Amino acid sequence: MKKQLFALLAAVMALGFTITAYSETTVFFEPTTDITAAAVGEHVAIDIKITGGKGVAGYGPLVVFDSAALKYIGTMPGDYLPTGGVWMSPELQDDGSYDVILIVGDTTVSGKSVQFPPAEVAPEPALEFSIDSVLFEIPELPPDSGLPNAPYWAFSILASSPLGVDTNPVPVDGDGTPGSDIKPVSVDGDGTLATLIFEVTEAKPAAITLLEINLSDTDDAPLESTLENSLITINAADAGERSAADVNGDGTVNILDLVFVAGKFGQPVTDPDEAGDVNDDGKINILDLVLIAQHFGN
């Protein structure tokens, strides 16, 4: 675990972008909320998924996002690794600043900087992580990693499985101390590594890019993986489009709006029916129903 932390710190500080070799293990983004027309003020959630994982005991993604249109809220661990290991991520606080959250087993510490392991776990910390080292602005993106003419920030998270059973319980040095071959539990298969949460702050296309995933095995050795669908664009809607979906003007986009448009489907756009033309293209058709469905419940 220590080697993995040092590797993450080195990658963050150097902002080294590498090309990931092809592997049967695939990591990709999968939005869990609508990103085609998210309104300003809404939260969007994006899962980091893995398929075909083999011997995975940890990961350390590096994510970049357009800070002009998106506010980073936080990251939740997925269900891929067993609980009780290590988790570290930057998280938004009530005062608008960010803290580093570090969880080691049952111990949670947070602050502008944290020590690993926490003092509650071990008296002599080996590493210190500040918020500036895990959430920071970057001056330039690699080619094809985002939209041009946008300010970008990057953040890292870190996760590791809990330690398994000691594989070498033979005393060493004659002092009765057990061996030190306890390693993190490894996982195979498919699942969710983490869920990223952002708030839409401006109505414009905004890119989120997964630049690195940094999978590791029980020995902290890197595992190869292939990144797919690692660049997604959130198309934020403005307030006008969102309110247009409320075709009956009752303040909520619901089944009544769908019924209204369905009843006018295919008819000419006249004064009494013009609210059914949600996208204002001169027709009442399936596109208007789709827009209502995208804002349903708002």
Image (cartoon, rainbow, N blue to C red):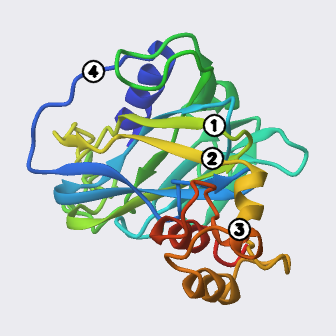
Of the numbered discs 4 and 2, the one sitting upstream in the chain is: 4
| Crowd class of label 2 (few under 14; some 14 to 19; many from 20; radius 10 Å) | many
Left or right position of 36 against 153: left
Q: 141 above or below 268?
A: above
Of the numbered discs 4 and 1, the one sitting upstream in the chain is: 4
Q: Distance between the residues labelled 4 and 3?
A: 53 Å
Of the numbered discs 2 and 1, the one sitting upstream in the chain is: 1
**3 vs 2, front mark:** 3
Give the labeled residue for mark 1: 204
Which residue is nearer to you in this view: 39 or 107? 39
Q: How far apart are marks 3 and 1 (CA)?
A: 26 Å
The residue type indicated by label 3 comes to: Glu
- The reply to whether the C-beta atoms of the residues labelled 4 and 3 are less than 8 Å apart is no
**3 vs 1, front mark:** 3
| Crowd class of label 1 (few under 14; some 14 to 19; many from 20; radius 10 Å) | many
The residue type indicated by label 4 comes to: Thr
Give the labeled residue for mark 2: 236
Give the labeled residue for mark 3: 274
The residue type indicated by label 2 comes to: Ala
Give the labeled residue for mark 4: 18
**4 vs 1, front mark:** 1
- The reply to whether the C-beta atoms of the residues labelled 2 and 1 are less than 8 Å apart is yes
